[in-house]
Amino acid sequence: MTQKARNEDSIAGPVAERLLDWYDRHRRVMPWRAKAGETPDPYHVWLSEIMLQQTTVATVKSYFLKFLELWPTVEDLAAAPQDDVLTAWAGLGYYARARNLHKCAQLVANDLAGRFPNTEKDLLNLPGVGRYTAAAISSIAFDTRSVVVDGNVERVMARLFDSHAELPKEKGEFYRLAGLCTPDLRPGDYAQAVMDLGATICTPKNPKCTLCPLVDLCQGKPHAESLPRKAPKKTKPVRRGYAFWLERRDGTILLCKRPDKGLLGGMVGFPGSEWTEDSLPPAPNTVPIPVTNLTEISGMVRHTFTHFHLELSLFKGDVVQDRYEHLPEKHFWARPEEFGDHALPTVMRKAADLAIDALKGEE
């Protein structure tokens, strides 16, 4: 054994015992987390882990409870129309997760007799389940030893071992270090413990080192805030587009359902243009139905997606009376107070808010 390996073993050896002792006293209470002594519900674990992908715990809590109220079991979720699932998910972002969530529920309910697989290998065959999620479900729901690595774990490992591996290209190094610490006994509690430690103690800024149960083992403590090392973020491009707020005399607004595949697939929004890095005024032939008084609403909708920033201009038009019912495919009418019944993503909710506020100002 090399000196480096001996040093790593001396650090890793006490980690699990200390973290589990700390977790037994300081574990966070979450609606999807089983209480001490309870058996975790795989449906709850899976649902929460899908929701938590790239989303904060604070945001997920209310959505998780709403989903459980609507669909208490995986069979209930599988039987729900996809549009209902997308509507309940609206505002949570990363909408491919919702489509995969529904597909996964149907597969588990219809092909697996309502039982989730209990191994990482089999979990990886489920729609929307990747390496981290498979390990988390396997570990937390079934107490199987799996190496769980998320952003919190990467940070704890980088500081504990003073690792200067760079993310994301050297992510494998953090799996290796996390594997040294992961125990055979209570691996599910351990996985939650190390994630709790990263979320509450070993935070990105101003870590609470004096409260950390691993402080005397931590090799990176003197420069903790500089770890883990990350590649410089690429500048996100800005895309631009426009959308139409087209209103009938009865106060209903034209909405349309987006294609099932692609960005915001299956979601509902306002008709409009493609989003490109060019800024072009709306062409008359892009308005889906005849309108009069087409004018730009003051203000701009700004929204950030994973790979780009969006600037969306909004145009108001009055619908020509004799074309009320002659709508393009997947277009329909809804009153603003009914928008909550449809799967409007956050960017379209922002557009609705802009239009409603602007029109109120004109009254």
Image (cartoon, helix red, strand yellow):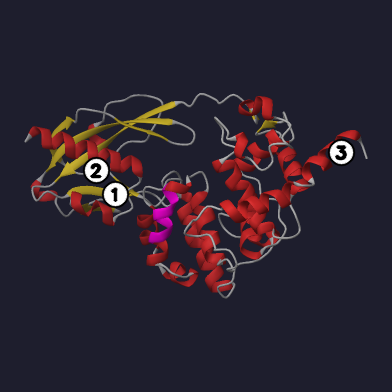
The reply to whether dot 2 and dot 3 touch (C-beta < 8 Å) is: no
Q: Position of residue 192 (x, y in %)?
A: 61, 52
Q: Residues within 10 Å of mark 1 (few under 14, many from 20)?
A: many
Mark found first going from the N terminus, 2 or 3: 3
Q: Which residue sits at x=23%, y=36%? A: 354
Q: How many marks?
A: 3
Label 1 to label 3: alpha-carbon separation: 59 Å
Q: Nearer the viewer, mark 1 or mark 3?
A: 3
Question: Which of the 4 image quarters holds residue 361?
Answer: top left
**Would you name the residue on which mark 3 appears?**
5
Residue placed most toward the observer, 25 or 308:
25
Left or right placement of residue 292 versus residue 15 in this view: left
**Would you name the residue on which mark 2 appears?**
288
Label 2 to label 3: alpha-carbon separation: 66 Å
Residue farthest to the right?
1
Q: Point out the stretch of residues depicted in magenta.
A: 59-66
**Would you name the residue on which mark 1 appears?**
256
Question: Which of the 4 image quarters holds residue 228?
Answer: top right
Principal secondary structure, stretch drawn in magenta: helix
Left or right placement of residue 15 versus residue 312 in this view: right
Q: Is residue 65 magenta?
A: yes
Mark found first going from the N terminus, 2 or 1: 1
Find numbered disc 1 in the image and state the secondary structure of the residue it sits on. Answer: strand
Q: Position of residue 342 (x, y in %)?
A: 29, 55
Find numbered disc 3 in the image and state the secondary structure of the residue it sits on. Answer: helix
Q: Position of residue 92 (x, y in %)?
A: 41, 48
**Which amino acid does the dot numbered 1 rest on?**
Cys
Q: Is residue 209 magenta?
A: no
